[in-house]
Image (cartoon, rainbow, N blue to C red):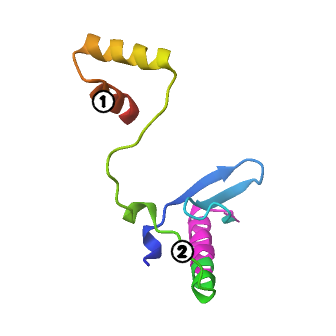
């Protein structure tokens, strides 16, 4: 498991007055530090420790989002009125509903 493949985020936390480091695959973990560089190093270390602990306990380790395979398909349920409205807009643009919604989601 390559820890570099996990999805890390560093952002400013006004509540804490410091930068906070997060890892999307481990939502319960975080790290606070005064600089973005220290924050990233901190959250990476916390994730590394968590993975080692999980391995030692035989727990399933989350697969990095970047390493997962995606089919390109997912279902979205919307009210019938929204479905109709999207179909009309797609038709007005001369594209399929799938292409229309895909383009809107990509923005």
Tell me if mark 1 has few (under 14), some (14-19) or many (20+) residues whose alpha carbon lies within 10 angstroms of its own.
Answer: few
Magenta stretch, overall SS: helix
Tell me if mark 2 has few (under 14), some (14-19) or many (20+) residues whose alpha carbon lies within 10 angstroms of its own.
Answer: some
Judge left or right: residue 46 versus residue 94.
right
- The quarter of the displayed image where residue 90 is located: top left
Q: Position of residue 39 (x, y in %)?
A: 62, 65
Q: Secondary structure at mark 2?
A: loop
In the rendering, which numbered label is found on residue 98? 1
- Please tell me which residue is depicted at 46% across the width and 35% down the height of the picture: 76
> Of 49 and 55, which appears nearest the observer?
55
> Of 99 and 35, which appears nearest the observer?
99
* Residues at circles 2 and 1 in contact by the CB criterion of under 8 Å: no
Quadrant that contains the C terminus: top left
- Please tell me which residue is depicted at 36% across the width and 35% down the height of the picture: 106
Q: Residue furthest left?
A: 94
Q: Secondary structure at mark 1?
A: helix
Decide whether residue 69 is among the magenta residues: no
User: Vertically, is 101 above or below 36?
Assistant: above
Q: Position of residue 89 (x, y in %)?
A: 34, 14
Judge left or right: residue 28 versus residue 24.
right
Q: Position of residue 31 (x, y in %)?
A: 67, 66
Mark with earlier residue (2, 1): 2
Residue range corresponding to the magenta coloring: 32-49
> Of 60 and 9, which appears nearest the observer?
60
Quadrant that contains the N terminus: bottom left
Judge left or right: residue 57 versus residue 1.
right
Which residue position is annotated with label 2? 61
Q: Position of residue 100 (x, y in %)?
A: 31, 25
Q: How many marks?
A: 2
- The quarter of the displayed image where residue 104 is located: top left
């Amino acid at each position: 498991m390559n820890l570099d493949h996990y999805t890390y985020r560093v952002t400013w936390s006004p509540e804490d007055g410091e930068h906070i480091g997060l890892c999307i695959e481990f939502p319960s973990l975080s790290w606070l530090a005064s600089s973005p560089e220290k924050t990233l190093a901190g959250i990476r270390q916390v994730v590394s420790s968590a993975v080692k602990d999980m391995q030692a306990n035989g727990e399933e380790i989350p697969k990095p989002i970047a390493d997962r395979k995606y089919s390109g398909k997912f279902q979205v349920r919307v009210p019938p009125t929204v479905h109709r409205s999207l179909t009309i807009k797609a038709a007005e643009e001369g594209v399929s509903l799938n292409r229309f919604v895909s383009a809107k989601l990509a923005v």
